[in-house]
Amino acid sequence: MSVQYVGMDVDKQKIVLARLGSGRETKVIEHVIANTPSAVKKYFASLLGGGEVHATYEAGCFGFGLYRQLSAMGVSVVLAAPGLIPRKPADRVKTDRRDAHSLSLALRAGQLVGIYVPTQQDESVRDYLRMYEAFRGDLRICKQRILQFLLRRSLCYDGGGPWTVKHRHWLSALEFEQPRDRQTLDMYLSQMQELEAKCAEAAAEVESIAAQDCYRQQTKKLTAFKGIKTLIALSFITDIGDFRRFANARQFMAYLGLVPSEHSSGNKRRQGGITKAGNTHLRRLLVEAAWHYRSYHPSSRDLTERRRGVAAAVLSYANRAGRRLNRNYMHILLRGKRSQVAVTAVSRELAGFLWGAMTDQVA
């Protein structure tokens, strides 16, 4: 039975395909089809009648629809990680046809690394979480605009922190020389209240998702760690899927781009900052969580509530992690390093602890 390798360059309107046979065959058959399910089905159905078909395209902004359609048809698909596609340094010509040809050659040679494709449920939850994060970011920006507007009017609240009940009453009672200033503030406040309502609704839905059977136990494990609440826990679960696809903790750290970059040759070893490769979104969330390890109080009310019902072995593991990460943070600061460097180092080690908890390496 023959085997065919198809490289695809995908855009909104069309798909450029380059097809190679197995072995050392060099003849490339090129086609251009419309980027529609019917056109894709027609093209690959004709190929499947002649034997086994392997296909690949570069992961991007088009999601996983094409991948799922081809997989359902029986095509073996590799969704290639963009940063790991082999490229010749001297090749300065880039066209859709050449990209498709390069992908088919790399697929046949086994040089492509595929990304993890989430289930449709996980993808739906992931997009909801990112929508919630976007609303929270919009709310933060809206509040900053209000405070900056008041600062331009030389109005400063001296009754404590902002956004308390007293502060909101103070805002509603403010009087301005220009009536339009009051109108401006009211519109800002109206937008803020609308965003707060949306965030509250989304937060309740996130807690409801985390309580589902398919997410409950995993979420409980992750939220046992300080700095990891439901939003971050669900983000890791839906983005990573099965943590066991990483053979060890270092692979997981590398996936998050938290390992040091290196350029060594001969007797010289040069290490730089973190690689920042892989999943940018999860890395940002993990660094946010790592800031909580500047201190460690396992008896805090919020953390105690989150840990209710968690297995004793996981609790002991999370406490060991908390004490170690706090100690390492202080040790790095005492060596004269900046707090940002210390937090980055802590986030790298925290990633290892999370991998250990999710793969039952808690002994």
Image: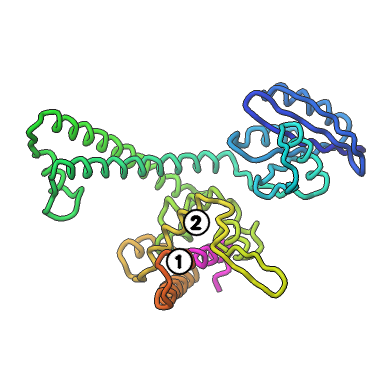
- Disc 1 crowd rating (10 Å Cα; few below 14, some 14-19, many 20+) is some
Q: Can you tell which mark lies on residue 217?
A: 2
**Secondary structure under badge 1?**
helix
Q: Position of residue 158 (x, y in %)?
A: 11, 53
Q: Position of residue 357 (x, y in %)?
A: 53, 64
Disc 2 crowd, CA 10 A, few/some/many (<14, 14-19, 20+): some
Q: Position of residue 353 (x, y in %)?
A: 52, 67
| Residue under the point 10% across and 29% down | 179
Q: Position of residue 286 (x, y in %)?
A: 47, 58
**Residue designated by label 1:** 341
Residue drawn at point x = 21 percent, y = 31 percent: 187
| Left or right: 334 as drawn, with respect to 200 | right
Q: Say the numbered circle drawn on residue 32.
A: none
Q: Quadrant of the C terminus?
A: bottom right
Hey, what amino acid is under mark 1?
Val
Q: Which residues lie in the magenta part? A: 346-363
Q: For the residue labelled by badge 2, is the local secondary structure a helix, a strand or a loop?
A: helix
Q: Can residue 295 be seen?
A: yes
Residue drawn at (42%, 50%) of the image: 231
Q: Residue at x 38, y 60 (%)?
A: 306
- Which secondary structure is most common in the magenta stretch? helix
